[in-house]
Image (spheres, rainbow, N blue to C red):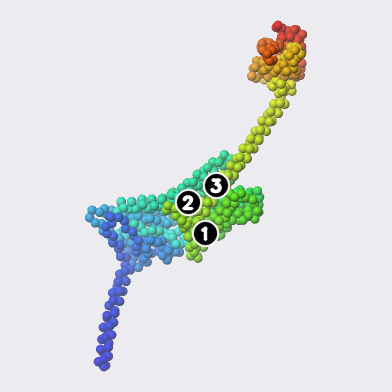
Amino acid sequence: MPSGYFALRRAAAIILLIFATPWVHATQANTKSTAAAPLVIKALGKGTFTLNGPWQFHTGDDLAWASPTFDSSNWEQLSADRPWGKQGHAQLTGFAWYRCSVTLIQGAGEPQESSLLVPGIRDSYEIYWNGALIGHNGKLPPRPVWYISQPVQTFDLGQIQHGVLAVRVWKAPLLSDDSGDVGGFDAAPLIGNPEAIANAKAAYEFQWLRSRQLHFGANLLCAAIAFLSFLLWLRTPNRWILFWTAGFAIAQPATLLLVNAHIEWPYSLAMAALQLLDAVQDISLWFLLLWLLSLREDCGIYRITQILAYLYAISETLDGALVAMSWNPQWTGVTQVFDAVLTVFLLLFEAFPLVLVGYALFQRKQFDSARWLVAILAFLDEMLLFFSDTVKQGRQFTGWSIADKIDSPFFFLDGNGISLSTLGGTLLLAAIVYVVYASVREDQHRQDALEREKMELLHESDRMRHHAEHDGLTGLWNHRVIVERLSEEMIRARRDGTPLSVILADIDHFKNVNDTFGHLAGDLVLKEIGTVLSHTLRPYDCVGRYGGEEFLMIVPNCGMESALLRAEQLRVAVQSAHIMEGETLVQVTASFGVASDFPPHYEAETVIRVADAALYRAKSCGRNCVVLAEMNTLVCDS
């Protein structure tokens, strides 16, 4: 070989060695970087540290993965500031694990204890520290208890200076309205001493409450509206518009209570309750629109609304049951198919308010400005809801993000985010409440007017009946009524076996009174004598003007001797009456005929005839006296 050839080979080897050395070092560096390098945290006692990453991430489930000796260097690396669904695992369901190696270096005089804060994981999870389970939130399958809205959780790590933190997370199977973007951490966990973690937790909760204060206030107002509407409906059950107002207003605060109060209900029960609350709100809106848009009189549309309401309630109940069943892996495929079928029907149900508003406009219903406002807001709100839900149902296939933009805050008010859907729903509720209570007030005014008219009619009826039953001059019962009352008392006396007496009185020389003082004075005498007789008798005795100057008195539970005594008292009272006609004193007397202990077969007319015969004998005896008919005894007093 020529010497130049060896020189060339030697030069090439040198060049290759020069370039190969950095490549080997780079390869070795990359190999080392795949290992689970620990996060070294110094001076932890001064505050908290965000465990953003890198975290080792792997799908599947094996409790051995919690062990600090397990090698996870070949696992995928993820950060904890975003859900895993937005980091390439949007379709992941079931179990997944996070692992992070942590080294804690506390300075002199700093607390040796450490704690962990997990801001939020939407799914059930368990926390392992150096292979030991230190806490969990919710129970993992097959029968999980799941918080609808997860609270901030804290866990004690103890005094261990170095360890491996492992998080075991369960994500439910994807259903029609799940985009798959969620899963795992919503925000990175924090580590620190117990006092700092407690302060961080309080800060998180305060910030969360501050950002929800307007939301809580609105829901509290909705609850008050629902409670007031329901109470008013209980007072007037025929006003169903108040019942539907209560149903429309109560759904949102009830959902808030179920979602944010962390009531430890079984997941199936919680989901069923949520679905039913949605159905209650939507169905209540349907019937409110029937009332407020004057569609209730249309029997066809009213019947269709009733049928759809029943179907909607059943569908939502089934949908809640399907979501609960989806936690059991063996039912995942079946529930996904049936959920997709039910979703089509639920979207159609959500579009029904648009049909009602459109039908009202097609019928050219005449509304006032407030009802027009309700119709417009209902159309816009339901159109926004229908569009948003339609996009949500398909976004796991399309990747559309417009539904999230609709639900995202439209503007902020003192830290409280107001979304477009929230604003539309609030305006719709305000308009409905205004129109409903204005309608109730108008109905109440009309009802009050009808009540007043009814009372006036009753008063007029009573007045006419009084005129028909009473003498127009004396105010006593007239001839017809007093005779009818005598017949009734005679029947009662025979039935009960009690005594009954009848007294017939006649004013003496009444014609002379008319001739001497005039007919007006005669009328005055009749009126005053009628008053004297009424006041002298017992409250349950009866007196009526029999005719002319004659008065018929019925004295129940009164035998012969008592009747004579009562008649004598009446005679004295008439004789003692001082009747003034202007400056003139007019005094009169009266004669009395008493019928008592008469045979049971006597009729009212017969008894009156017997009493009248006694009265005639009293007149013949010299007047101003009492005569007993049965005994034909004359009792005369001058």
Residue drawn at (57%, 51%) of the image: 374
Lower position in the chain sequence, tag 1 or tag 3: 1
- Which residue is pictured at 42% across the width and 64% down the height? 86
Work out how far the residue at label 1 is from the one at label 2, CA to CA, in angstroms: 23 Å
Estimate the x, y position of residue 474 in percent, counting from the top left: 70, 20
Q: Residue at x 27, y 80 (%)?
A: 18
Q: Residues within 10 Å of mark 3 (few under 14, many from 20)?
A: many
Sort mark 1 into few (<14), some (14-19) or many (20+) by Cα contacts within 10 Å.
Answer: some
The spot of residue 472 in percent (x, y) is 72, 23
Distance from disc 1 to disc 3, alpha carbons, whole Å, reads 25 Å
Helix, strand or loop for disc 1: helix
Label annotation for residue 108: none
Q: Nearer the viewer, residue 507 or 399?
A: 507
**Element class at badge 2:** helix
Crowdedness near tag 2: few (<14), some (14–19) or many (≥20) residues, C-alpha within 10 Å: many
Residue at the disc numbered 3? 433
Disc 3 residue type (three-letter): Val
